[in-house]
Image (tube, helix red, strand yellow):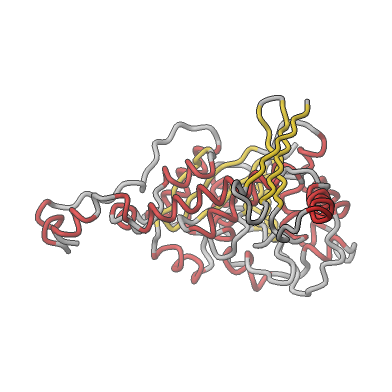
Amino acid sequence: MGLLDYFRSRSPATTSASVAKERLQILVAHERAQRNKPDYLPKLQRELLEVVRKYVQVAEDAITVTMEEDGDREILELNIILPDEPDPKVKTKARRR
Amino acid sequence: MARIIVVTSGKGGVGKTTTSAAFAMGLAMKGYRTAVIDFDVGLRNLDLVMGCERRVVYDFVNVLNGEATLHQALIRDKRRDNLFILPASQTRDKESLTKEGVERVLNELAETHEYIVCDSPAGIEKGATLAMYFADDALVVTNPEVSSVRDSDRMLGILASKSRRAELGVEPIKEYLLLTRYSPERVRLGEMLSVEDVQEILSMHLLGVIPESKSVLGASNAGTPVILDEKSDAGQAYGDIVRRYLGEQVPHRFVEENKKGLLKRLFGG
């Protein structure tokens, strides 16, 4: 531990601890969001994929369904990425009380 | 009515058994009649850390199976006569570890003890989920390291949804963060998550910080809970934690580095 280390430790953006913190914050937020979602979401996602695929050939992972809570509202968010379109992303939001 | 405390973490090797032994001993030193149960069926180790491995006759599974009474299986600590250890079995047979069985043993212990400390095994399998199911309080032992923090968060989710308190819809388990193997110097160098970082990520109440310390290995080598090593930093930190848990206002220690002289700071050493 010398003079150079002392100054080096002043730049928090580049330390491995700050990288760890950032990675964990993203991961934990993601995992918490997954934790309390209803059991039917994976099945809903599969069936939606089948329906969409009747009309558009999208990739297996082109559909994501997420459930979020916003105060007293639950937001069911459906993302479908369509292939080779000028605007490749169609976003639909369904809300329910 | 006894208060049931689970010592949990998800991840292995972070200091659950060290903490269970020290915490239970600390409560006993404060005069409370305390029992500590090893839930790690198949991998008994609390007996070693408590230094009573040669006195094990019957174990938790024997009691659950009705092969021994609770009284026969409980080992009275040689240093504190108000501290009792219920060791885990070494057989892998976890069949007898049922919710009903564990509840029966805890109820019987609660009649004669004020605190029951449940030393959880690592993971989220049966032993771990049963160790926390009946808990009133949870000590979540965490190392300032990514996989441990992630697993602790996972345990928080389980504590909040899969416990008896959650299922009954009563006041949830009180969760306390216990950050172990902490090195203020490595935090200053940016090599280790700080206590503030971990608190921010987990959003938990901090019960205390245990510094990385040689005394922890020394204590388990000797079979003496580290809290009895009152000269050591880790022993003092556990002492603080017990007092804080019991409601005393104790300022946090071992979060900052020991003060070094200016020359040492500038030129290393």
Q: In the figure, is residue B35 to the left or right of B213? A: right
- B77 or A18: nearer the eye? A18
Is there any visible trace of residue B33 in the rendered image? no
Which quarter of the picture shows residue B251? top left
Name the quarter where the C terminus of chain A is drawn.
top right
In the depicted structure, whether residue B20 falls above or below residue B244: below
Which quarter of the picture shows residue B60? bottom right
Identify which residue is drawn at 49% across, 40% down.
B206
In the depicted structure, whether residue B14 falls above or below residue A13: below
Query: How far from the left and from the top, in percent, is residue B126?
Result: 78, 60
Query: How far from the left and from the top, in percent, is residue B3?
Result: 69, 40
Identify which residue is drawn at 61% across, 41% down.
B175
Name the quarter where the N terminus of chain A is drawn.
bottom left
Disc tally is 0
Q: In the figure, is residue A20 to the left or right of A56? A: left
Q: Which residue lies furthest to the front in this view?
A: A86
Identify which residue is drawn at 49% across, 58% down.
B146
Query: How far from the left and from the top, in percent, is residue B222?
Result: 49, 70
Is there any visible trace of residue B36 in the rendered image? yes
Q: Residue furthest left?
A: B263
- A65 or B212: nearer the eye? A65
Q: In the figure, is residue B78 to the left or right of B62? A: left
- B213 or B179: nearer the eye? B179
Query: How far from the left and from the top, in percent, is residue B125?
Result: 74, 61
